[in-house]
Image: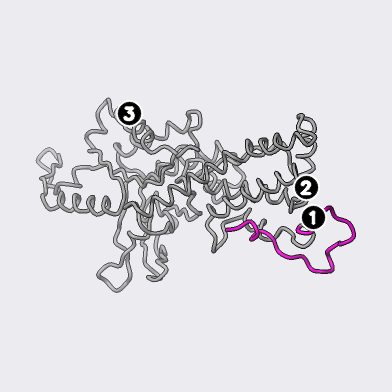
């Protein structure tokens, strides 16, 4: 995307040719596309990835502010700069990046700022360039890092497919999911949709954080709640979807990290995921279009774009249930078939680019299981850190 794409020609009757500085003809003939800026504030464009838009908007702001501080050939007026900055912040937010903190709102504010900070006169031109570079340079570098990651992904065997939605955390009867459009890979929950949660917002480039999940929950379920209240309610709702003590222990141990400094920026741990990426939606042998139930115990969409599946295996995962004995005790007999099916599914997921970690249910009932899990998550999160500029 080019910076020119953010402008459109003004109608002839709106152009004032009587007074403008040398070089200002571009600003007179072209105006910022206000409608486009508003669209960017409320969601991604259909044909332009947010990453490409963010790179172009960063370049636009950098070029225009430098032009204002040196040659006075800026293309935007004050009102247009305000709109561009708002759109820039929104797009960066969707990408999971922190927007730059500009100490001014528009060109006039930049003029006042440089006068107050000893950047006046011809000799101050370089100081003004350096000022803009200091403010916008880190954002440009972070975007370049994302572009590099995206480029490298083309040559890696990472997860295939396009993010569609997350169907997760069912409570009560499980959802029945059907494939409605095999071309567009559209799915529909035809039964028990009220028992599960569905996340279909755009997936940021740096995975899915707890803060983003809380924002989604508040918007869709608790619009009047503040962030702490929404976070508490969402956590309780996720916890209700777990019916085994080992799984509950795992969720509690991980979610305790949300209370730490910057904890809301950790990847969200999503339980009981029925459908996450379209490579895993497929027709059954029946003609109803029912989907194979590909449920993950837990899913992490990590900051480095890794997709991490965590499974907690009870005896029923690898053994067949025996009739209760005379004392009512239930035992299991190891099943080579069940174990082979589990191993085959692991291979398939790994070849598709996913990471899989398994815990035995017994392991998570021991007294030291919280520490075992805490150490595991510390190492896992350190391995999958968000790329830094």
Residue for badge 2: 72
Q: Quick one: which residue is furthest to the front in this view?
A: 123
42 left or right of 297 in image: right
**For numbered disc 3, what is the local secondary structure?**
helix
Q: Mark 2 or mark 3, which is nearer the start of the sequence?
A: 2
**Looking at the image, do the residues carrying marks 3 and 2 touch, with CB atoms under 8 Å apart?**
no
60 left or right of 302 in image: right
Q: Mark 3 or mark 1, which is nearer the start of the sequence?
A: 1
The residue that appears at 79% across and 68% down in the rendered structure is: 11
Residue 173 appears in view: no
Give the x, y percent position of residue 180: 40, 70
Foreground: 288 or 389?
389
The residue that appears at 36% across and 31% down in the rendered structure is: 378
Residue for badge 1: 24
Give the x, y percent position of residue 291: 32, 64
Circle 3 residues within 10 Å: few <14, some 14–19, many ≥20: few
The residue mark sitting in front, 3 or 2, is 2
Residue 233 appears in view: yes
Q: From which residue to which does the magenta span run?
A: 1-26
Q: Quick one: which residue is furthest to the bottom in this view?
A: 287
Q: Is residue 275 above or below residue 134?
A: below
Q: Is residue 129 above or below residue 31?
A: above
**Looking at the image, do the residues carrying marks 2 and 1 touch, with CB atoms under 8 Å apart?**
yes
Q: Could you give the CA–CA distance between mark 3 and mark 2, rounded to whole angstroms?
A: 56 Å
């Amino acid at each position: 995307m080019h910076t020119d794409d953010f402008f459109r020609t003004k109608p002839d009757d709106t152009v004032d040719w009587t007074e403008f500085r040398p070089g200002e003809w571009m600003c007179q003939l072209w105006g910022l596309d206000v409608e486009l800026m508003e669209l960017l504030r409320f969601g991604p464009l259909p044909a332009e990835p947010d990453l490409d838009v963010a790179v172009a908007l960063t370049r636009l702001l950098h070029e225009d502010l430098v032009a204002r501080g040196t040659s006075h050939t800026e293309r935007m007026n004050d009102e247009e700069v305000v709109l561009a900055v708002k759109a820039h912040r929104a797009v960066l937010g969707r990408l999971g990046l922190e927007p730059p903190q500009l100490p001014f709102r528009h060109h006039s504010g930049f003029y006042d700022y440089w006068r107050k900070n000893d950047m006046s006169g011809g000799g101050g031109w370089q100081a003004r360039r350096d000022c803009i570079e200091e403010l916008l340079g880190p954002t440009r570098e972070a975007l370049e890092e994302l572009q590099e990651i995206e480029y490298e992904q083309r040559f890696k065997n990472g997860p295939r497919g396009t993010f569609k939605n997350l169907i997760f955390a069912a409570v009560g009867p499980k959802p029945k999911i059907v494939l409605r459009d095999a071309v567009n890979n559209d799915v529909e929950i035809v039964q028990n949709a009220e028992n599960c949660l569905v996340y279909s917002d755009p997936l940021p480039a740096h995975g899915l954080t707890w803060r983003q999940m809380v924002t989604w929950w508040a918007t869709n379920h608790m619009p009047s709640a503040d962030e702490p209240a929404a976070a508490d309610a969402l956590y309780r709702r996720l916890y209700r979807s777990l019916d085994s003590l080992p799984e509950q222990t795992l969720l509690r141990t991980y979610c305790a990290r949300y209370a730490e400094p910057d904890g809301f920026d950790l990847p969200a741990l999503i339980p009981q995921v029925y459908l996450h990426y379209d490579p895993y939606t497929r027709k059954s042998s029946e003609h109803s279009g029912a989907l194979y139930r590909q449920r993950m115990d837990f899913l992490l969409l990590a900051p480095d774009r890794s997709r991490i599946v965590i499974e907690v295996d009870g005896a029923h995962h690898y053994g067949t249930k025996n009739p209760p004995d005379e004392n009512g005790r239930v035992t299991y007999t190891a099943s080579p078939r069940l174990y082979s099916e589990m191993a085959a599914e692991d291979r398939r997921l790994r070849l598709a680019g996913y990471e899989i970690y398994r815990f035995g249910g017994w392991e998570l009932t021991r007294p030291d299981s919280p520490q075992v899990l805490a150490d595991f998550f510390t190492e896992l999160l350190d391995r999958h850190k968000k790329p830094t500029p």
